[in-house]
Image: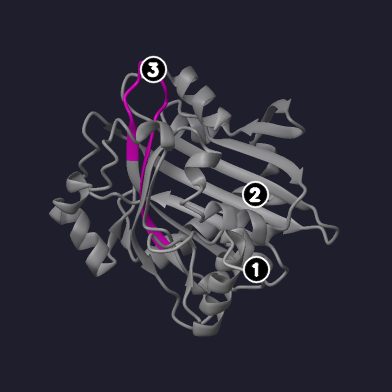
């Protein structure tokens, strides 16, 4: 019929036929990853939208998607091309190496054996909030949080949402910019990919933008549990967006346990070091709110 919806579905069929799955393309209508996932598309086949900017920040960036502070950073570009990333704790490895590390850290920190290490301190929107006092202290007072809840969705839906960088600024109003620097496929067809992603967020007036480079990926366990993972690996000599301050995502992991009835038990652990002059209590409030 020529309607927008018909064009989108025809494009999806074409992409499925050619086995060249895209989350978004600048030359054609964007295809939502949720649409692709609902059609049974394997996440390992996707190509991510390259750059997105939050709507309220477009005028401040003059609608310019160029990133010379990244493109001209030789150290960063070497990490991208060689797939040799320096993690925040000084360990060097490939993107998949760091995803394996974060996967093991997440499984350990969310295990029943370590449940007692977290202190419960509140509940909001039917989600329980916990803090790990020892790891918070090791992070110089920046909170190490755990949040638990049951959501009305399947793991594949949340996973698709996390990698829908085109729509993420609509979900998280603090997103200034997200840019995929490189996507690294798995060794075999069907193996999970991971991506090197530049991000910039706005904590809000009067604070400067915070930005960094994270390696982001996912894992699937044999029991059906799905993990969405991220860790900072911006390396040495990182240069921030003009007017910005570098931040560090030490730990980030969703544990998604399907319940078989359309709901999923979701656990999130995270610790973000925003740096600069933001007081720790404001940093922790900001991170928890997001």
- Above or below, 173 relative to 67: above
Q: Is residue 79 visible?
A: yes
In this picture, is 42 found above or below 152?
Answer: below
Report the mark closest to the observer, 2 or 1.
1
> Could you give the CA–CA distance between mark 3 and mark 1, rounded to whole angstroms?
42 Å
Q: Which residue is mark 3?
A: 205
Q: Position of residue 245 (x, y in %)?
A: 28, 31
Q: Residue at x 39, y 17 (%)?
A: 205
Query: Measuring 64% from the left and 61% from the top, which residue is drawn there?
Result: 226
Residue drawn 68% across the image and 58% down it = 155
114 sits to left or right of 245: right
Mark number, residue 221: 1
Q: Is residue 220 visible?
A: no
Asked where in the image residue 220 lies, by quadrant, the reply is bottom right
Q: Where's the C terminus, which quadrant?
A: top right
Q: Which residues are magenta?
A: 195-211
Which residue, given by chain and number where applicable, does mark 2 sit on?
110
Residue 26 counted in the magenta span: no
Circle nearer the viewer, 3 or 1: 3
Describe the element under mark 3 as helix, strand or loop. Answer: loop
* Residue 280 x/y as whole percent: 44, 20
- Locate residue 219, reporting x and y percent: 57, 65
Give the structural element (helix, strand or loop) at label 1: loop
Q: Are marks 3 and 2 in contact (CB under 8 Å)?
A: no
> Was residue 199 drawn as part of the magenta stretch in this picture?
yes
Seen in the picture, residue 36 relative to 54 is either above or below; the reply is below
Q: Mark 3 and mark 2: span between their CA atoms?
A: 35 Å
- Label 3 vs 1, first from the N-terminus: 3
């Amino acid at each position: 019929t020529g309607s927008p919806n018909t064009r989108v579905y025809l494009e999806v069929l074409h992409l499925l036929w050619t086995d060249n799955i895209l989350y978004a393309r600048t030359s054609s209508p964007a295809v939502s990853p949720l649409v692709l996932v609902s059609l049974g598309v394997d996440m390992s086949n996707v190509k991510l939208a390259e750059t997105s900017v939050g709507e309220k920040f477009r005028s401040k960036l003059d609608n310019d998607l160029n990133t010379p502070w990244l493109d001209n950073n030789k150290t960063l570009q070497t990490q991208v091309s060689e797939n040799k990333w320096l993690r925040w704790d000084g360990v060097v490895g490939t993107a998949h190496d760091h995803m394996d590390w974060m996967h093991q850290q997440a499984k350990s920190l969310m295990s029943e054996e370590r449940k007692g290490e977290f202190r419960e301190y509140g509940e909001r929107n039917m989600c329980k909030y916990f803090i790990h006092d020892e790891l918070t202290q090791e992070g110089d007072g920046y909170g190490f949080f755990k949040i638990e809840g049951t959501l009305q969705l399947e793991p594949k839906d949340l996973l698709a949402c996390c990698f829908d960088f085109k729509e993420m600024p609509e979900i998280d109003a603090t997103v200034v910019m997200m840019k995929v620097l490189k996507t690294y496929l798995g060794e075999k067809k069907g193996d999970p990919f991971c991506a090197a992603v530049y991000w910039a967020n706005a904590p809000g007036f009067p604070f400067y933008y915070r930005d960094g480079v994270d390696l982001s990926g996912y894992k699937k366990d044999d029991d059906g549990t799905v993990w969405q993972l991220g860790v900072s690996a911006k390396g040495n000599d990182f240069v921030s967006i003009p007017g910005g301050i570098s931040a560090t995502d030490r730990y980030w992991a969703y544990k998604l346990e399907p319940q078989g009835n359309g709901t999923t038990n979701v656990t999130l652990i995270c610790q973000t070091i925003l740096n600069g002059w933001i007081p720790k209590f404001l940093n922790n409030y900001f991170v928890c709110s997001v």
